[in-house]
Amino acid sequence: MNQVTLLVLAAGMGSRYGGLKQLDPVGPNGETVIDYSVFDAIRAGFNKVVFVIREEFSEEFKKSVGNKFVDKIAVEYAYQNINDLPDGFSVPEERIKPWGTGHAILAASGVVNESFAVINADDFYGKDAYTQICNYLISFDDKQEQRIYCMVGYPLRNTLSENGSVSRGICSINESGQLESVKELTKIVKTDQGPVNMSEDGESVLLDGAEIVSMNMWGFTPDIFVHLERLFTTFLEQNLDNLTSEFYIPFAVDSLIAAKTACVDVLQTTGNWFGVTYQEDKDSVQDSIQLLIKSGEYPLSLSQL
């Protein structure tokens, strides 16, 4: 059986949320969203979890999160550093913003040598998503000529916040169930009529709600690191002086699909997804977890694993 790793992107501080939201308790016994993610990963069959964090809060993170799992699954850490750039590049003096999710994955290249799934630390993806992506990665045939990756997609209507706008990657999927492109819509709001995208020119576009969106749950083989290094170098050549630009995973995947370097199978789930984008989202996340516990989806205490 192939080894499969869960890569948790936890290096970001939530600017709109305020504070280190990855460590906020949402479960009845102080569990974080990450705790539920790792719990789901373990019971789905993952063998290792790697947390991508910032070194300055390493001690706090390990004490609050990572140490809970050392006797249940192999645990490792990778550190995302804004100064970690390819040879020939240096960080502009005014740059504060990190380089994005694609750069965060690259930070783990030294500790991940097997197929792996990528998730955001502050998103709750649900049991079905982990089961689907783990089974897919375990059964992956590494001898295939064309590189095949995967992602888990959710209906847009299942991913909105009651407390403000969200950014979502709307997926175009072909008849074979493979991803053709991801279009990033950066200001989608929930209304009585349905989800509405507010474009930069002020135009409002009513969406269907059934659109499949990427919530940054991707499945890759380790050769993705070579592609990301190349694409990140290209990104820096074009955007180094743009102090707010970021190297996002969908951008990299889109580039690989367009170049026919890789294809991406879309695993669709109607399972529960919710996230903490705003401070006000925390209450609804806590309520949703309580309902899942009452339905038997999760135990009252995750230590029961």
Image (tube, rainbow, N blue to C red):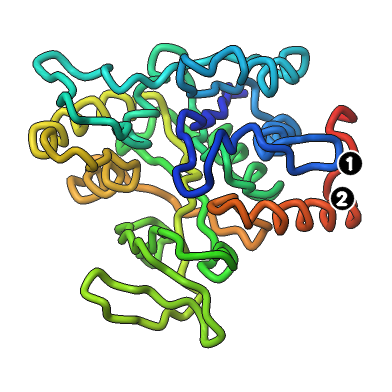
Residue sitting at x 32%, y 32%? 98
What is the secondary structure assignment of the residue under circle 2? helix
Compared to residue 268, the image places residue 192 above or below, namely below
Q: Amino acid at mark 2?
A: Ile
> Which quadrant of the figure contains the C terminus?
top right
Residue at image coords 71%, 15%: 67
Q: Residue at (59%, 50%) from the top-left corner? A: 276
Identify which residue is drawn at 16% across, 24% down. 93
Query: Do the residues under discs 1 and 2 have CB atoms within 8 angstroms?
Result: yes
Q: Look at the image and tell me in which quarter the N terminus lies.
A: top right
Residue underneath mark 2: 293
On the rendered structure, is 283 left or right of 177?
Answer: right
State the CA–CA distance, disc 1 to disc 2: 6 Å
User: Could you tell which of marks 1 and 2 lies nearer the N-terminus?
Assistant: 2
**Which of the two residues, 245 or 76, is positioned nearer the viewer here?**
245
Say left or right for 170 vs 191. left
User: In the picture, residue 139 is in which quadrant?
Assistant: top right
Q: Position of residue 241 (x, y in %)?
A: 11, 35
Q: Position of residue 119 (x, y in %)?
A: 52, 39
Residue 100 percent across, percent down from the top left: 33, 36
Q: Which mark is residue 299?
A: 1
- Taking the view exactly as shown, the residue that stands out farthest to the bottom is 193
Of residue 131 and residue 160, the one placed in the foreground of this image is: 160
- Amino acid type indicated by mark 1: Pro
Of 256 and 72, the residue lying toward us: 72
